[in-house]
Amino acid sequence: MKHAQAIEIIRKLKAKKVKFEHGLSDAEVQQIENKFNLRFPPDLQYFLQKELPISNGFVNWRLGLQSKIEAMDIRKRIDWPFSGIVFDIEHNAFWMEEWGEKSNDLNENIMVAEIYYETYPKMIPIYSHRYIPSEPHKTGNPVFSIYQTDIIYYGYDLAHYFAHEFRFELSDKFPIIDAPNHIDFWGDIES
């Protein structure tokens, strides 16, 4: 994400009544990544360092460094995708072929799913139940809407996600994207 693109998105989000604080510092980014065991993709990091959205629904990363309650909420949001997978294993017969044969033992199935889950790109919450993968560590990862295993692309990159979620048009500063970058696992179960 380039400077002019970030400024345009922030301006348009502010017009939609999204509240912002000053952006995260390099030190805060490092502390957040260490505390929550994640790595922001470059475009999300750049955006969060320009200005930090703090309206309801957004992750208040800075507050997560200051408040144990907020940190617990952020951890729950980070764990939400796996919790949804577990729910669907238990209640909706969800199972990935690559995980091998499904057992009759629910706990064993959850353990197998967790082993595989740990190998998939970690999902970073942005807003509500919208997530961006941390890997590959590059600009242009798609944003997914994740509700249990009902997973759909909600933006082919971060900018297009914000435009879709908050219903605004992007200027010609943004490239047209015809298809998302493929993300292991998440793109494979996309509905």
Image (cartoon, helix red, strand yellow):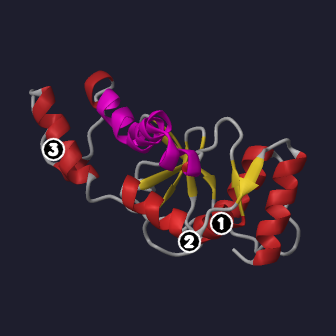
Q: State the residue at coordinates (64%, 61%).
A: 48
> Disc 2 marks which residue?
26
Give the CA distance from mark 3 to mark 1: 37 Å
In this picture, is 25 found above or below 138?
above
Q: Amino acid at mark 2?
A: Asp
Residue 44 locus on image (x, y percent): 60, 64
- Where is residue 114, by image quadrant? top left
Question: Does the segment drawn in magenta span residue 73?
Answer: yes
> Disc 1 marks which residue?
49
- Where is residue 11, by image quadrant? bottom right
Residue contact at pointers 3 and 1, CB within 8 angstroms: no
Please give the label number shown on residue 84.
none
In this picture, is 141 found above or below 93?
below
135 or 60: nearer the eye? 60
Q: State the residue at coordinates (80%, 61%).
A: 9
What is the magenta range?
62-88
Residue contact at pointers 1 and 2, CB within 8 angstroms: yes
Q: Amino acid at mark 1?
A: Gln
> Disc 3 marks which residue?
112
Residue 55 locus on image (x, y percent): 71, 40
Q: Amino acid at mark 3?
A: Val
